[in-house]
Amino acid sequence: MTQNIEITKALIKLQGILKNPSKSAENPFYKSKYTPLDQLINHIKPSLSDCGLTLVQHPVGENGQIGITTILMHESGESIERLFSTIIPKNDPQSIGSAITYFRRYAIQAILNISSEDDDDANTHTDNKASKPEPMTDDQREEIKCLLADTDSDEAKFFDFLGVTGFDAMTQTHFTKAVNALNKKRGQK
């Protein structure tokens, strides 16, 4: 392990003067607050400079992953470099840009040991449909009812199998599981 004596001293000094930034933006989907990237950068720059530090970040992409390399540099020439990358669910420019901004904020917070947002368990950048299951449609409900009749299936046992209380509690995931199970049962008749 390389010894980074000067950058370590600077980070110790930084921890004494750098406070968590104020959370000025609100995420309406998850009712959490955070510091936008531009405000976070403006908040940390003076303290970094006072400690002889600067921070550089650049996006990286490789093997279907997107990420950020963060380099914390000291005036002595010592530096700490960390890569954060992951696969993002959607590979379109908007999603990539959003992910890069998100990664930059989190990488800055991690390398400087600060917090600029309420902990939302990463809900900000997960697929909303995954956190709020999409309900089954009326047409899908009718398809399930027909399959139940075709297979002489007991509705109560069917709902127990799916772990739901009734049709109103069924989501798209339940629909897929139900159709597969009922078609399999129909094929066994």
Image (cartoon, grey):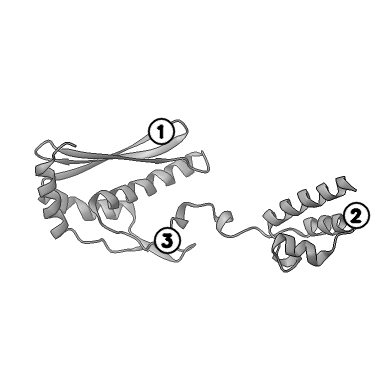
Q: Look at the image and tell me in which quarter the N terminus lies.
A: top left
Which of the labelled discs sits on residue 150, or is there none?
A: 2
Q: Quadrant of residue 117?
A: bottom left
Q: CA distance from mark 2 to mark 1?
A: 51 Å
Q: Residues within 10 Å of mark 1 (few under 14, many from 20)?
A: few
Q: Earlier in the sequence, mark 2 or mark 3?
A: 3
Element carrying mark 1: strand
The residue positioned 76% from the left and 54% from the top of the image is 178
Give the residue pinned by disc 1.
Answer: 61
**Where in the figure is residue 160, as x and y percent of width and height?**
74, 64
Q: CA distance from mark 3 to mark 1?
A: 26 Å
The CA span between labels 2 and 3 is 45 Å
Element on which disc 2 rests: helix
Crowding around mark 3 (Cα neighbors within 10 Å: few <14, some 14 to 19, many 20+) is few
Q: Percent from the top left, x then y, of residue 6? A: 9, 43
Camera-side mark, 2 or 1: 2
* Occupied quadrant, residue 150: bottom right
In x, y percent, where is residue 161?
73, 60
Q: Amino acid at mark 3?
A: Asp
Q: Label 1 amino acid? A: Gly
Q: Which residue is mark 3?
A: 120
* N-terminal label among 3 and 1: 1
